[in-house]
Image (cartoon, rainbow, N blue to C red):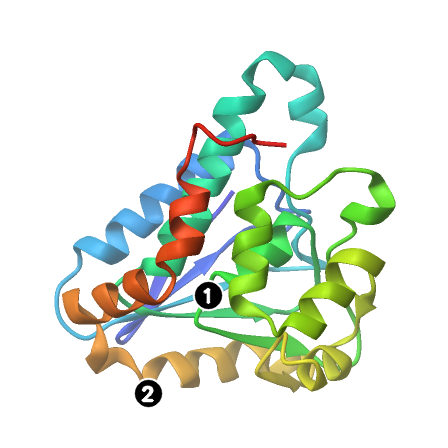
Amino acid sequence: MPSLDRHDNVFVLDLGDGENRFHPDWLTAVSAALDEVEKAEGPRALVTAATGKFYSNGLDLDWLFAHADQYDDYVVSVHELFARMLSLPVTTVAALQGHTFAAGAMLSLAHDFRVMRADRGYWCLPEADINIPFTPGMAALIQSRLTPQTAHEAMVTARRYGGSDAAAAGIVDQAVSEDAVRSTAIEIAQAQVAKAGDTLGTIKTRMYAPAMATLRDVTSPLG
């Protein structure tokens, strides 16, 4: 399960050591961690990271298939996580040490910056291969954070990007060695801690207002 630590002014949210899929309990734990970061005072920033082979494999499809009657509520909660991360009033950096797939990749895009391991692991939106269309909110998030060319390729072809390719495509900001992923993310975050606060939150909220409105529009089709 996710756990939150603090390194000086940088909060580090470790998403877990498994596939880190979006089980409802996992979503609740992440939300509680974001509450703590938001309620803290003074200079601060947030790094999300993970331990092991995966950053996140996205939606918990096993749980979802077993609880199909809760689909709408589940997707609303996932959309809310994306919208909240997009507009969090602190600088956010995703440290992608392992595979980052589907909704896990979308979560990484909701951060301000991304650092990825260069030599192993993939960033991928596999929806075209697994026959699960993007919700309007998911499509809006992806297209708000990637260039049109990269968004098209990633969404339509389900390409698996290694770290160097992801950096070249502008999906991640840096591709570094395995042992430097988390420390580089913390360095980026530390440089931005003084910007935490309402002004930063307002800038991000206004910058991504169309995507956030789509993510939070519970009257639109969810899939």
| Rendered image quadrant of residue 60 | top right
Going by the picture, which residue comes out furthest to the top? 69
Residue positioned 82% across, 48% down in the render: 128
Left or right: residue 197 versus residue 160 is left
- Crowding around mark 1 (Cα neighbors within 10 Å: few <14, some 14 to 19, many 20+) is many
The three-letter code of the residue at mark 1 reads His
Q: Position of residue 13 (x, y in %)?
A: 43, 58
Q: Position of residue 16 (x, y in %)?
A: 56, 50
Q: Mark 1: which secondary structure?
A: loop
**Please, is residue 37 above or below residue 147 in the view?**
above
**Please, is residue 210 above or below residue 165 in the view?**
above
The three-letter code of the residue at mark 2 reads Ala
**Please, is residue 46 above or below residue 189 in the view?**
above
**Please, is residue 150 above or below residue 35 in the view?**
below
Q: Position of residue 161 (x, y in %)?
A: 78, 71
Q: Position of residue 10 (x, y in %)?
A: 32, 72
Residue positioned 24% across, 72% down in the render: 44
Left or right: residue 196 versus residue 12 is left
> Rounded to the nearest whole Å, what is the CA distance between mark 1 and mark 2?
15 Å
The residue identified by callout 1 is 111
The residue identified by callout 2 is 191
Going by the picture, which residue comes out furthest to the left? 41
Residue positioned 61% across, 40% down in the render: 135
Residue positioned 60% across, 51% down in the render: 139
Left or right: residue 132 versus residue 60 is right
Q: Is residue 205 visible?
A: yes
Q: Is residue 3 visible?
A: no
Mark 1 or mark 2, earlier in chain: 1
- Name the quadrant of the C terminus: top right
